Image (spheres, rainbow, N blue to C red):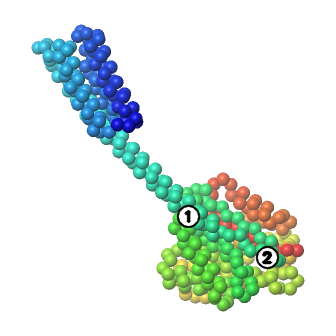
Amino acid sequence: MNRPAVTAHALPLATLAAVVVTDLLIGREQVLISLVAIAPMVAATALGRRATAGYGVAAVVTAAVLGVYDQQYTETTVVAQIARIVGVTAGGVAAVAACTLRQRREAQTRRLVAEQAADRAVLELAETLQRSLLTEPPTLERLTTAVRYRPATVGAHVGGDWYDAFAVPDGTTMLVIGDVEGHDARAAATMAQARGMLRGLAQSVVGSPAAVLSALDRALLDLDVEALVTITVATLDERAPAGAVELRWSNAGHPPPVLVGADGSAGLLARPVDRLLGLDEAGPRYDHELLLTPGDTLLLYTDGLVERRDAPLDDGLASLVDRLRGSSARPLEDVCDSLVAELGGQADDDVAVMALRVRV
């Protein structure tokens, strides 16, 4: 028997021994027989059902034997003695029932702890995967870049938001900001699939952001990836004259980009928005074009930055534009930091932000 088991048995044994010794010491005139029922109750708090039942039997036997010493089997005392033994027996049964209930609760607690540990492991793996996919954008000659990602502080802490930026064969740089429906490990895994497929398609599909999105939509449907995805894909061409950058983008159900002019003016690039990915592949997708001039800032983001449970989306978009107005004079990193900081300590959704500014 190991040390913890010996320690667990010590208290009920000591209780039983103390009652017996006390009963013997005070003499036959004082009867403490009923107190032996304490021993199985004490055992029920730390030992198993078998051990508790053993102490219950020991208590009944002890009560019966002490009854002989205390002369409780005479014609005038036997009824009371039988009642004591019945009471001790009932106490033993109650102790076993209490022990059973305790063990069930302990087993349930262990199961919940194990499940929580497993869930944490899955979420930590998903979060590690998600963060590993959020790479820093490439260094661009004419553009300063800044990115931010903040997981939801409520719930699973992982989701399907992501940003990406990489070079494509036609000499432009492709930007991606996307959001897979859901806020769990499955959404993060689907995000990784969509990101990988988009990167591969962008290297082989000849055409515009709209063409890449159409190819990605077909791939998701053909592979039975059951998810709804909002996404904006854009290309930046730094070969425009006078230090400008040519922007071309296509929007699949995603919040519109924000443009902050060099003069501090701000507004949404609210062009017509195409359908989400994952609904169907019918119908065309469209590109939109804009020339970014030195000092202009482009902000791409996911809906966690603007959506609030207690306000319409349009209010969130208007608030974002107001916050960005006049920010062209501030460092791009500070602008991103302030946008994320203004979310406060609680966030129901992930937030991904990608900001770019044409160098002056």
Q: Position of residue 336 (x, y in %)?
A: 75, 63
Q: Say left or right for 347 vs 94.
A: right
Q: Say left or right for 292 vs 148.
A: right
Separation of disc 1 and disc 2 at Cα?
A: 30 Å
| Residue at image location 50% in from the left, 77% down from the top | 225
Query: Which residue is nearer to you in this view: 348 or 312?
Result: 348
Q: Position of residue 269 (x, y in %)?
A: 73, 76
Query: Which residue is nearer to you in this view: 249 or 172?
Result: 172
Element assignment for label 2 = loop
| Residue at image location 26% in from the left, 35% down from the top | 53
Q: Quadrant of the C terminus?
A: bottom right
Task: Check disc 2 and give the amino acid type.
Answer: Leu
Task: Check disc 1 and give the amino acid type.
Answer: Ala
Q: Earlier in the sequence, mark 1 or mark 2?
A: 1
| Residue at image location 85% in from the left, 74% down from the top | 359
Q: Which residue is disc 2 drawn over? A: 140
Res 132 → quadrant:
bottom right
Q: Is residue 294 visible?
A: yes
| Residue at image location 72% in from the left, 57% down from the top | 341
Q: Which mark is residue 144?
A: none
Q: Is residue 225 above or below residue 307?
A: below
Res 142 → quadrant:
bottom right
Q: Which residue is disc 1 drawn over? A: 126
